[in-house]
Image (spheres, grey):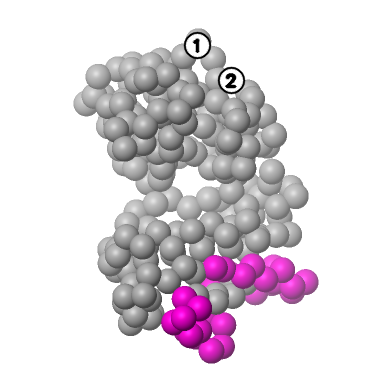
Amino acid sequence: MRQLLTAALSALLLVPAVARADDDAASQDKGCGLVSGALISQGQGQVMINCVGVSEEFGGQLAGILTYVLQNRLDPEIVIAKLNEIEGVPEGDGPRSLTADQGQAIVQSLLGSKPAVIAMVANPGGSDSGDYALAIATRLGMAGWQIEGSQIRRLVPPGLDSINGLVLVVRNEKAPPEKALALKKAMAAAKIYVPIVADPQMPDGGTMLWVGKRPSFNPAAAATTQ
Protein backbone atom coordinates (compact mmCIF):
# COMPACT_ATOMS: atom_id res chain seq x y z
CA MET A 1 0.00 0.00 0.00
CA ARG A 2 2.84 2.38 0.82
CA GLN A 3 4.44 1.70 -2.55
CA LEU A 4 1.14 2.52 -4.21
CA LEU A 5 0.77 5.80 -2.33
CA THR A 6 4.38 6.74 -3.03
CA ALA A 7 3.80 6.18 -6.73
CA ALA A 8 0.59 8.13 -6.59
CA LEU A 9 2.26 11.03 -4.82
CA SER A 10 4.68 11.53 -7.69
CA ALA A 11 1.75 11.98 -10.05
CA LEU A 12 -0.53 13.87 -7.59
CA LEU A 13 -3.42 11.56 -8.43
CA LEU A 14 -7.03 12.20 -7.48
CA VAL A 15 -8.64 9.18 -5.85
CA PRO A 16 -12.41 8.71 -6.35
CA ALA A 17 -14.10 6.06 -4.22
CA VAL A 18 -16.98 3.84 -5.28
CA ALA A 19 -19.44 2.92 -2.52
CA ARG A 20 -20.91 -0.56 -2.91
CA ALA A 21 -24.47 -1.05 -1.69
CA ASP A 22 -25.22 -4.68 -2.50
CA ASP A 23 -27.98 -6.38 -0.53
CA ASP A 24 -25.46 -8.50 1.33
CA ALA A 25 -23.07 -5.60 2.02
CA ALA A 26 -24.22 -5.29 5.61
CA SER A 27 -23.13 -8.86 6.30
CA GLN A 28 -19.61 -8.32 4.95
CA ASP A 29 -16.66 -6.71 6.69
CA LYS A 30 -16.30 -3.04 5.88
CA GLY A 31 -13.26 -2.11 3.87
CA CYS A 32 -11.85 -0.72 0.66
CA GLY A 33 -9.60 -2.15 -1.99
CA LEU A 34 -8.23 -1.35 -5.41
CA VAL A 35 -10.44 -2.25 -8.33
CA SER A 36 -8.73 -4.80 -10.57
CA GLY A 37 -6.37 -3.06 -12.88
CA ALA A 38 -4.93 -1.04 -9.99
CA LEU A 39 -3.38 2.10 -11.37
CA ILE A 40 -5.14 3.32 -14.47
CA SER A 41 -3.02 5.09 -17.08
CA GLN A 42 -1.12 8.04 -15.64
CA GLY A 43 -2.61 10.17 -18.34
CA GLN A 44 -6.02 9.65 -16.79
CA GLY A 45 -4.54 10.26 -13.35
CA GLN A 46 -6.99 8.21 -11.28
CA VAL A 47 -7.08 5.19 -9.01
CA MET A 48 -10.42 3.40 -8.64
CA ILE A 49 -11.25 2.08 -5.17
CA ASN A 50 -14.22 -0.14 -4.28
CA CYS A 51 -15.60 0.25 -0.74
CA VAL A 52 -17.87 -2.37 0.84
CA GLY A 53 -20.32 -1.71 3.68
CA VAL A 54 -20.22 2.10 3.58
CA SER A 55 -22.63 4.71 2.29
CA GLU A 56 -22.02 6.64 -0.92
CA GLU A 57 -21.59 9.81 1.13
CA PHE A 58 -18.92 8.23 3.31
CA GLY A 59 -17.20 6.83 0.22
CA GLY A 60 -16.93 10.38 -1.10
CA GLN A 61 -15.43 11.52 2.19
CA LEU A 62 -12.83 8.75 2.00
CA ALA A 63 -11.91 9.97 -1.47
CA GLY A 64 -11.44 13.47 -0.10
CA ILE A 65 -9.17 12.20 2.67
CA LEU A 66 -7.00 10.23 0.25
CA THR A 67 -6.80 13.18 -2.12
CA TYR A 68 -5.64 15.38 0.77
CA VAL A 69 -2.97 12.83 1.73
CA LEU A 70 -1.68 12.71 -1.84
CA GLN A 71 -1.76 16.43 -2.56
CA ASN A 72 -0.02 17.30 0.71
CA ARG A 73 2.53 14.47 0.40
CA LEU A 74 1.75 13.08 3.85
CA ASP A 75 3.53 9.95 5.07
CA PRO A 76 0.86 7.17 5.15
CA GLU A 77 2.39 5.64 8.29
CA ILE A 78 2.11 8.94 10.16
CA VAL A 79 -1.49 9.37 8.96
CA ILE A 80 -2.40 5.88 10.21
CA ALA A 81 -0.70 6.52 13.55
CA LYS A 82 -2.74 9.68 14.02
CA LEU A 83 -5.97 7.94 12.99
CA ASN A 84 -5.36 5.38 15.74
CA GLU A 85 -5.58 8.24 18.25
CA ILE A 86 -9.14 9.10 17.19
CA GLU A 87 -12.19 7.58 18.88
CA GLY A 88 -14.56 5.90 16.45
CA VAL A 89 -18.32 6.37 16.09
CA PRO A 90 -20.41 3.83 18.09
CA GLU A 91 -21.30 0.60 16.33
CA GLY A 92 -24.76 0.19 14.83
CA ASP A 93 -27.14 3.08 15.29
CA GLY A 94 -26.21 3.85 18.89
CA PRO A 95 -26.14 7.54 19.86
CA ARG A 96 -22.87 9.38 20.31
CA SER A 97 -21.84 10.06 23.88
CA LEU A 98 -18.86 11.21 25.92
CA THR A 99 -17.22 8.65 28.16
CA ALA A 100 -16.06 9.69 31.63
CA ASP A 101 -12.45 9.60 30.39
CA GLN A 102 -13.25 11.77 27.38
CA GLY A 103 -15.09 14.32 29.49
CA GLN A 104 -12.23 14.46 31.97
CA ALA A 105 -9.70 14.89 29.17
CA ILE A 106 -11.62 17.86 27.75
CA VAL A 107 -11.91 19.57 31.14
CA GLN A 108 -8.26 19.01 32.08
CA SER A 109 -7.05 20.34 28.73
CA LEU A 110 -9.20 23.48 28.89
CA LEU A 111 -8.22 24.26 32.48
CA GLY A 112 -4.81 25.16 31.11
CA SER A 113 -6.26 27.77 28.75
CA LYS A 114 -8.05 31.08 29.19
CA PRO A 115 -11.84 30.64 29.62
CA ALA A 116 -13.69 31.70 26.50
CA VAL A 117 -17.13 32.13 24.97
CA ILE A 118 -18.10 30.13 21.88
CA ALA A 119 -21.32 29.58 19.98
CA MET A 120 -22.69 26.05 19.80
CA VAL A 121 -25.21 24.88 17.22
CA ALA A 122 -26.73 21.39 16.92
CA ASN A 123 -28.44 20.04 13.82
CA PRO A 124 -32.15 19.71 14.71
CA GLY A 125 -32.43 16.81 12.27
CA GLY A 126 -29.89 14.68 14.09
CA SER A 127 -31.33 12.07 16.46
CA ASP A 128 -28.48 12.49 18.95
CA SER A 129 -27.04 15.90 18.04
CA GLY A 130 -28.75 17.81 20.85
CA ASP A 131 -27.76 15.39 23.63
CA TYR A 132 -24.20 15.11 22.31
CA ALA A 133 -23.90 18.90 22.14
CA LEU A 134 -25.21 19.20 25.70
CA ALA A 135 -22.68 16.67 26.97
CA ILE A 136 -19.85 18.66 25.39
CA ALA A 137 -21.24 21.99 26.63
CA THR A 138 -21.42 20.60 30.18
CA ARG A 139 -17.71 19.79 30.12
CA LEU A 140 -16.89 23.20 28.69
CA GLY A 141 -18.82 24.79 31.56
CA MET A 142 -16.86 22.74 34.08
CA ALA A 143 -13.69 24.31 32.66
CA GLY A 144 -15.10 27.83 32.98
CA TRP A 145 -16.08 28.24 29.34
CA GLN A 146 -19.43 29.72 28.33
CA ILE A 147 -21.86 29.05 25.51
CA GLU A 148 -22.91 32.18 23.62
CA GLY A 149 -26.40 33.24 24.68
CA SER A 150 -26.32 30.50 27.33
CA GLN A 151 -28.00 28.13 24.90
CA ILE A 152 -27.29 25.52 22.25
CA ARG A 153 -29.04 26.73 19.13
CA ARG A 154 -31.00 24.20 17.06
CA LEU A 155 -30.82 25.30 13.43
CA VAL A 156 -28.79 24.68 10.29
CA PRO A 157 -26.51 27.57 9.29
CA PRO A 158 -25.96 28.01 5.54
CA GLY A 159 -23.35 25.66 4.17
CA LEU A 160 -23.36 23.26 7.13
CA ASP A 161 -26.39 21.12 6.28
CA SER A 162 -24.26 18.50 4.52
CA ILE A 163 -21.54 18.37 7.20
CA ASN A 164 -21.92 15.52 9.67
CA GLY A 165 -19.95 15.12 12.87
CA LEU A 166 -18.21 18.00 14.62
CA VAL A 167 -16.51 21.03 13.09
CA LEU A 168 -15.24 24.32 14.44
CA VAL A 169 -16.33 27.27 12.31
CA VAL A 170 -14.21 30.46 12.24
CA ARG A 171 -13.80 33.41 9.91
CA ASN A 172 -10.36 32.38 8.66
CA GLU A 173 -9.25 28.78 9.14
CA LYS A 174 -5.63 29.77 8.44
CA ALA A 175 -5.63 32.17 11.39
CA PRO A 176 -8.17 30.75 13.86
CA PRO A 177 -8.79 32.39 17.25
CA GLU A 178 -6.82 30.99 20.19
CA LYS A 179 -10.01 29.60 21.72
CA ALA A 180 -10.68 27.58 18.57
CA LEU A 181 -7.21 26.06 18.76
CA ALA A 182 -7.60 25.40 22.49
CA LEU A 183 -10.92 23.63 21.96
CA LYS A 184 -9.57 21.61 19.03
CA LYS A 185 -6.65 20.52 21.24
CA ALA A 186 -9.00 19.61 24.10
CA MET A 187 -11.19 17.51 21.83
CA ALA A 188 -8.09 15.81 20.43
CA ALA A 189 -7.08 14.95 23.99
CA ALA A 190 -10.42 13.12 24.20
CA LYS A 191 -9.62 11.34 20.91
CA ILE A 192 -12.26 13.34 19.06
CA TYR A 193 -11.14 14.90 15.79
CA VAL A 194 -12.71 18.30 15.11
CA PRO A 195 -11.56 20.07 11.92
CA ILE A 196 -11.60 23.84 11.57
CA VAL A 197 -13.51 25.30 8.61
CA ALA A 198 -13.97 28.85 7.38
CA ASP A 199 -17.11 30.93 7.05
CA PRO A 200 -16.59 34.56 5.94
CA GLN A 201 -19.89 35.43 7.63
CA MET A 202 -18.47 34.63 11.06
CA PRO A 203 -17.54 37.66 13.18
CA ASP A 204 -13.83 38.34 13.54
CA GLY A 205 -12.55 36.37 16.53
CA GLY A 206 -15.71 34.28 16.73
CA THR A 207 -15.81 30.51 17.06
CA MET A 208 -18.76 28.15 16.61
CA LEU A 209 -18.88 24.44 17.36
CA TRP A 210 -21.23 22.74 14.90
CA VAL A 211 -22.65 19.41 16.06
CA GLY A 212 -23.94 17.77 12.91
CA LYS A 213 -25.76 14.51 12.40
CA ARG A 214 -24.14 11.28 13.41
CA PRO A 215 -21.85 10.16 10.55
CA SER A 216 -23.31 7.23 8.63
CA PHE A 217 -21.09 4.35 7.49
CA ASN A 218 -23.57 1.67 6.50
CA PRO A 219 -26.18 2.52 3.86
CA ALA A 220 -28.64 0.19 5.56
CA ALA A 221 -28.42 2.24 8.76
CA ALA A 222 -28.36 5.68 7.15
CA ALA A 223 -32.11 6.17 7.33
CA THR A 224 -32.22 5.49 11.07
CA THR A 225 -29.14 7.40 12.18
CA GLN A 226 -29.86 10.76 10.62
Residue 198, horizontal then vertical, whole percent: 43, 35
93 in relation to 150, above or below: below
Q: Secondary structure at mark 2?
A: strand
Answer whether residue 158 is magenta in the image.
Answer: no
Residue 37 picture location, percent across and down: 53, 89
Residue extending furthest toward the right? 23
The 10 Å Cα crowd at callout 2, few under 14, some 14 to 19, many 20 or more, is: some
Which residue occupies the extreme bottom position in the image? 37
What residue is disc 1 on? 150
Do we see residue 29 in this rendering?
Answer: no
| Quarter of the rendering occupied by the C terminus | top right
Residue occupying the point 34% across, 20% down = 205
Residue 154, position in %: x, y?
63, 23
Q: Which is nearer the eye, 50 or 16?
A: 16
Which contiguous range is marked in magenta? 16-45
Task: Describe residue 33's horizontal placement relative to residue 144 as left or right.
Answer: right
Q: Amino acid at mark 1?
A: Ser
User: Image check: 91 left or right of 73?
Assistant: right
Q: Residue at 49% x, 24% y: name it.
A: 201
Which of 161/106 is in front?
Answer: 161
Closer to us: 76 or 81: 76
Q: Which residue is mark 2?
A: 153
Residue 91: which quarter of the image? bottom right
Q: Dividing the picture into quarters, in which one does residue 4 lie?
A: bottom left
Residue 220 placement, left or right of 15? right
